[in-house]
Amino acid sequence: MNRLIELVNENLDKYIEIRYPEDIFKAMRYTVLLPGKRLRPVMCLETCRMLGGNIMDALPAACAIEMLHAQTLIHDDLPCMDNDDYRRGKLTNHKVFGEALAVLAGDALLTFAPQVIVKNSQKLGAVKLLKILEEYFQYAGAYGVIAGQVVDILNENTVSVASAETLDFIHTHKTADLFKLSIRTGAIIADADEAQISAMTDFAQKLGFAFQIADDILDETSTFEKMGKTLGKDKLEGKLTYTALFGLDKARSDLAHLLHDCRSVLMKNAFQSEIFEQIIGKIAVT
């Protein structure tokens, strides 16, 4: 896993060169290159490998997905959204570059990422490239993470009347959709069949949901030193979270069940991956 993280970091640095106007590229690089787990690009590469593909073929798309993830973080941290000052232990983008440039850096990454795929994945062929871009725009846009963010905002201070279906929508689109994009993209590049893609999509949905429940738990139980961001804000701002709706005990129980289901999907389909086992294990430690 560390080798894949290093590979992703090296190529992220290469893809985002500082050009004129320098400030926008500096702002883009700032959040993209912050130290992180690189879960999404790693999942893209590992899915490709696990299903018989070449990870180097998936590297541009994997890096593009990390850029998209950074874009969601930049915009999520803005004063008009979650108003966070820290991300991964460092000041958030708008605290360093100002709100206007942070908005533009997010916008730039949203469009720069698919350019990276197109420019660096020509060997995949037009048909496969179009499929990958279709996946990107589906999960990056109004049907994906943006939809999740909108419903998240609209349901602040509604915990007492909110439904489980609304929370499911938020967690699915704010978190699980980028997991699905990562895994489905890796599968497409590996020429996986529809049954394999369907199974891995189910895995990604469960893993993404588990990841978000774990994050909700940690927001109430962890520390700034461990998480690198301000904790407890969700409760203060009346965010609709799993712990707010169901409590810590049920959140922990449901997290364990979801992670068990993730392992079951891998076993049932004879998908063998030490990396996915590591990821599941790290989420389970919550």
Image (tube, rainbow, N blue to C red):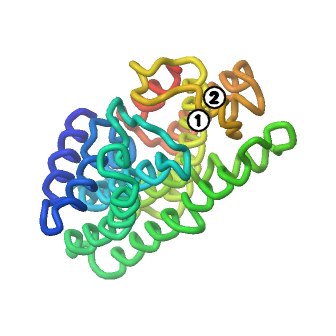
At x 59%, y 31%, the residue is 233
At x 25%, y 61%, the residue is 24
* Residue pointed to by mark 2: 255
User: Which element is circle 2 on?
Assistant: helix
Q: Which mark is residue 210?
A: 1
Q: Which mark is residue 243?
A: none
At x 59%, y 26%, the residue is 232
N-terminal-most mark, 1 or 2? 1
**Cα distance, mark 1 to mark 2?**
5 Å
Mark 2: which amino acid?
A: Leu
Q: Picture quarter containing residue 27?
A: bottom left
Q: Picture quarter containing residue 257?
A: top right
Of residues 201 and 96, the one drawn nearer to the viewer in this rendering:
96
User: Which element is circle 1 on?
Assistant: helix
Residues tagged 1 and 2 counted as in contact (Cβ below 8 A) = yes
**What is the residue that sits farthest to the right in this orientation?**
161
**286 versus 88 height, above or below:** above
At x 27%, y 74%, the residue is 118
Q: Provide residue 45's location: percent of width, then percent of height.
A: 31, 50
Of residues 228 and 197, the one drawn nearer to the viewer in this rendering:
228
Q: Provide residue 20's location: percent of width, then percent of height.
A: 14, 68
Residue 191 visible to the viewer = no
